């Protein structure tokens, strides 16, 4: 069983109780304007560029099997249409001007890293959090990881936007100790505008999990002018009270994703669609 991840963060203290290891799975069905991890959206590996670090050595030109990189007037130019995102150029870039984001890994490889920190989980009441992207977008891989953690008695949390068929959620839920459930907007029209999708499925899955007694923490990104209006927050609070959800975490907005969009050669929509 393999899946695609783009990072593993150790000693995380904001992704569930205790000291945790957060595994970031690649791929997300939403396109939130404020997304601070745009490299998480595509399910496939991607190439991030930092031109200011380039020293013009030309190693990447020789390494590229697609001929997508060339030296022009002393500058390295990349034809992203021809780029296969294979990472050959990043492997030889000593200046770290190129980075391949995303790698295919096995369950065993992930668990080998996770198990290194079991003493910290035991001491702090921590565990492993599967985040993204959207971890439910790789259901088979996520399920295998959750089962592996359960077999090792490691606490699990799934950080999800809830946008997945109920059949997927239902097949995973018994292996999850805590759902960190991202809830952005209650108004469906606003949700469509700012995330690119309806929230009907998200709300239905949240209700179904709560009715089945699962541990849930709501996570609300506080985005100025979008999610922070009084009516939206009131409706989220009312829904939490109705469902018996006692913990709501507010996630402050930050714009660190803007630079990542540039590295990916994409536009940061938050700056143009407010």
Image (cartoon, rainbow, N blue to C red):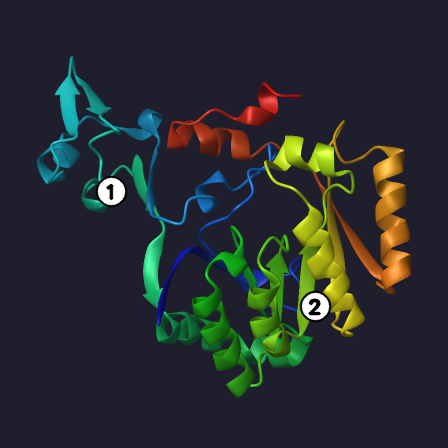
Q: Is residue 14 left or right of residue 230?
A: left
Q: Is residue 134 left or right of residue 53?
A: right
In this rendering, the count of numbered labels is 2
In the image, residue 32 lies at what x, y percent? 60, 37
In 3D space, how far apart are the residues under numbered discs 1 and 2 (Cα atoms)? 36 Å
Front residue of 19 and 250: 250
Q: Is residue 5 above or below residue 83?
A: below
Q: Secondary structure at mark 1?
A: helix
Q: Quadrant of residue 157?
A: bottom right
Q: Quadrant of residue 48?
A: top left
Q: Is residue 18 left or right of residue 42?
A: right
Front residue of 136 and 167: 167
Mark 2, residue position: 17
Q: Is residue 202 above or below residue 138?
A: above
Point 84% across, 63% down: residue: 245
Image quadrant containing the C terminus: top right
Q: Quadrant of residue 227?
A: top right
Mark 1, residue position: 90
Q: Is residue 59 left or right of residue 267?
A: left
Tell me if mark 1 has few (under 14), some (14-19) or many (20+) residues whose alpha carbon lies within 10 angstroms of its own.
many
Q: Secondary structure at mark 2?
A: loop
Image quadrant containing the N terminus: bottom left
In the image, residue 234 lies at what x, y percent? 90, 43
Point 49% across, 39% down: residue: 38
């Amino acid at each position: 069983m393999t899946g695609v991840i783009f990072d593993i963060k150790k000693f995380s203290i904001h992704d569930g109780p205790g000291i945790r290891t957060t595994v970031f799975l690649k791929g997300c069905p939403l396109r939130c304007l404020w997304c601070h991890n745009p490299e998480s959206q595509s399910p496939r590996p991607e190439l991030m560029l930092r031109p200011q670090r380039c020293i013009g050595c030309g190693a990447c030109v020789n390494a590229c099997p697609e001929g997508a990189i060339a030296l022009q007037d002393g500058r390295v130019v990349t034809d992203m249409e021809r780029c296969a995102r294979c990472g050959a150029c990043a492997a030889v870039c000593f200046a770290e001007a190129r980075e391949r984001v995303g790698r295919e890994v096995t369950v065993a490889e992930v668990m080998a890293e996770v198990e290194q920190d079991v003493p910290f989980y035991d001491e702090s009441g921590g565990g492993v959090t599967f985040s993204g992207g959207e971890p439910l977008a790789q259901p088979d891989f996520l399920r295998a990881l959750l089962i592996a953690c359960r077999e090792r008695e490691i606490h699990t949390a799934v950080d999800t936007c809830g946008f997945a068929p109920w059949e997927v959620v239902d097949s995973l839920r018994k292996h999850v100790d805590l759902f960190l459930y991202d809830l952005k907007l209650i108004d469906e029209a606003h949700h469509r505008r700012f995330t690119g999708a309806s929230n009907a499925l998200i709300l239905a899955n949240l209700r179904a999990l709560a009715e089945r007694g699962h541990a849930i923490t709501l996570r609300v990104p506080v985005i100025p002018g979008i999610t922070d209006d009084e009516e939206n927050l009131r409706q989220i609070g009312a829904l939490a009270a109705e469902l018996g959800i006692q913990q709501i975490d507010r996630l402050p907005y930050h714009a660190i994703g803007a630079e990542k969009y540039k590295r990916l050669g994409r536009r940061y929509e938050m700056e143009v669609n407010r």
